[in-house]
Image: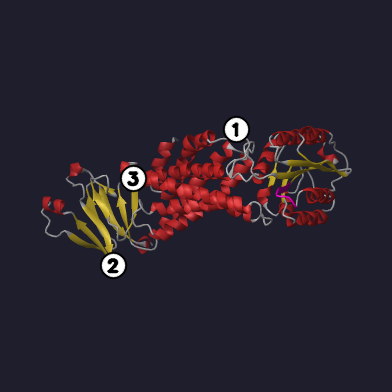
């Protein structure tokens, strides 16, 4: 079944129609605009403003045989090559048959590569002692300096003493050190979540994925919200520009797509010039606000020892985007309550943000962003339409019957539902059937539902009464369409 036929079959299912349009619009904007924007603003020169001290804490127990340690060593060497060692310092600590600082914090790449090369697998998993050694290295050298402190733990198993290791991890986090875990093999993800204090700081990697896991860890260390490849580390201004621009393009894609979805649902032309200009302008502003706010919160919360707040920064931008896009739909979905629109968009943004973060952590940079953008657009569209359906269930509404199987619902309120041949109406009719550009309008006046015919049309039809009071169950036939006033009780 083609996408076109699928959308035709979904004409009567507005939540799914909006979800598909939202996903498609967001994905299209990400591919055509977002990714090229990131590529154009990509920096070839490392510009790390905040120096980092990083301890690579590597499990060298016997279980790291069968090529795992070899792959870790390769990934760790690539990690070191991507660093700006003019500002960063890196240490290597291992735990296995013994626990030792293979090299203290240094910016000498040869020393670091030699330390990595010397690692071999043997012994058990004394993770607690390894963590204490890593903490000691940072406390001795850097905690009193203007430098950010991080430990990247790589392990494939459960520590010899889980309680001891947990206490060591807690002391590490309380010292203001960011603890990130890269796991493989039999490592317990739930346990590693406990010791890092945050599931988003745990990255699982199968064989062949260790390098990507290290890149994901870098994204956390270097505070990049939409990219995990930290070879280029940007100033705060550049980060805000890139994130706000990328989010603005996504907002534009979602907004244009939802307008087209709404127009398709109402059997109108997909997009007029006027609506397009308004949508582009408003959505770019909304996306810029959302992206800037999210990136700022991410930057603010990242250095804090209470790293649970990091998720707030990561998700806040998408929640704000959802709320703003939801609020914007009020302007093209007649009589949609602003509060409901904001709630629907906020919920959709929150759910979509969670999906975005999950896919980005699994698939990495470009594929992760594109799949995440699709999920974000899907849920924002779905929840906005769903909240509209909830509003329809609580008050009288208008139902348009196009064919025996095709229907369109309209919220009734103080904003008139226009009927006519103009591009600016909500219910289109054919001029060949004798209808004028604006034939009639239906609106609520207090508790009354009014249908008021246009004077030009009334004169053509020699109508003596141009205003009618409509009741629940009343129908009117206008050319090929029949409109009916309904409410929740009429459906029971």
Label 3 CA crowd tier, 10 Å (few <14, some 14–19, many 20+): some
**Image quadrant containing the C terminus:** bottom left
| Spatial separation of the CA atoms under disc 2 and disc 3 | 29 Å
Q: Is residue 387 left or right of residue 362?
A: left
Residue of label 1: 44
Q: Position of residue 288 (x, y in %)?
A: 47, 47
Task: Answer left or right for 209 relative to 286.
Answer: right
The answer to whether any part of residue 390 appears in the image is no
Horizontal and vertical percent for residue 280? Answer: 39, 44
| Residue found 34% across the figure and 50% down from its top | 408
Q: Residue at x 61, y 34 (%)?
A: 45
Q: Which residue is mark 3?
A: 275
Q: Circle 3 — which element?
A: helix
From which residue to which does the magenta span run? 144-150
State the residue in front, 177 or 152.
177
Q: Which residue is mark 2?
A: 446
Camera-side residue of 39 and 165 = 39
Instruction: Give the label, 3 or 1, closer to the camera.
Output: 1
Q: As drawn, is 209 to the left or to the right of 116?
A: left
Q: How many marks can you see?
A: 3
The Cα–Cα distance between marks 1 and 2, rounded to whole angstroms, is: 63 Å
* Mark 2 or mark 3, earlier in chain: 3
């Amino acid at each position: 079944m083609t996408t076109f036929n699928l959308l035709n079959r979904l004409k009567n299912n507005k939540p799914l129609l909006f979800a598909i349009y939202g996903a498609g619009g967001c994905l299209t904007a990400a591919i055509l605009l977002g990714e090229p924007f990131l590529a154009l603003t990509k920096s070839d020169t490392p510009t790390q403003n905040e120096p980092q001290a990083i301890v690579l804490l590597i499990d060298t127990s016997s279980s790291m045989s069968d090529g795992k340690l070899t792959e870790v060593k390769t990934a760790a060497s690539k990690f070191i090559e991507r660093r700006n060692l003019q500002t960063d310092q890196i240490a290597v600590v291992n735990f296995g048959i013994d626990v030792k600082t293979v090299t203290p914090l240094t910016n000498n790449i040869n020393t670091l590569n030699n330390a990595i090369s010397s690692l071999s697998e043997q012994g058990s998993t004394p993770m607690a002692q390894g963590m204490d050694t890593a903490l000691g290295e940072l406390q001795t050298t850097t905690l009193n300096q203007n430098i950010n402190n991080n430990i990247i733990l790589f392990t494939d198993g459960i520590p010899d003493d889980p309680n001891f290791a947990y206490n060591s991890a807690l002391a590490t986090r309380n010292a203001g050190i960011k603890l990130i875990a890269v796991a493989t093999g039999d490592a317990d993800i739930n346990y590693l979540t406990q010791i890092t204090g945050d599931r988003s700081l745990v990255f699982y990697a199968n064989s062949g994925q260790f390098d990507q896991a290290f890149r994901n860890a870098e994204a956390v260390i270097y505070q990049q919200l939409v990219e995990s490849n930290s070879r280029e580390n940007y100033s705060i201004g550049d980060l805000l520009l890139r994130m706000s621009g990328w989010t603005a393009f996504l907002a534009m894609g979602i907004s244009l797509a939802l307008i087209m979805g709404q127009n398709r649902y109402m059997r109108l032309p997909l997009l007029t010039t006027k609506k397009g200009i308004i949508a582009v302008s408003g959505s770019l502003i909304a996306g810029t606000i959302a992206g800037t706010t999210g990136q700022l919160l991410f930057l603010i919360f990242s250095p804090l020892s209470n790293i649970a707040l990091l998720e707030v920064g990561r998700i806040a931008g998408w929640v704000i985007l959802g709320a703003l896009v939801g609020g914007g739909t009020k302007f093209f979905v007649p009589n949609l309550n602003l509060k409901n629109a904001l709630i629907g968009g906020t919920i959709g943004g929150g759910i979509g943000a969670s999906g975005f973060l999950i896919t980005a952590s699994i698939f990495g940079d470009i594929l992760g962003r594109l799949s995440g953008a699709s999920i974000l657009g899907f849920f924002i569209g779905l929840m906005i339409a769903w909240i509209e359906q909830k509003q329809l269930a609580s008050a009288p509404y208008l139902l348009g019957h196009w064919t025996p199987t095709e229907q369109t619902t309209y919220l009734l309120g103080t904003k008139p539902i226009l009927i006519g041949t103009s591009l600016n109406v909500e219910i289109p009719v054919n001029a060949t059937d004798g209808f004028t550009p604006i034939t009639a309008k239906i609106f609520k006046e207090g508790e009354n539902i009014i249908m008021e015919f246009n004077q030009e049309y009334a004169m053509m039809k020699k109508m003596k009464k141009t205003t009618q009071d409509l009741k629940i169950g009343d129908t009117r036939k206008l050319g090929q369409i029949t409109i009916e006033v309904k409410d929740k009780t009429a459906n029971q």
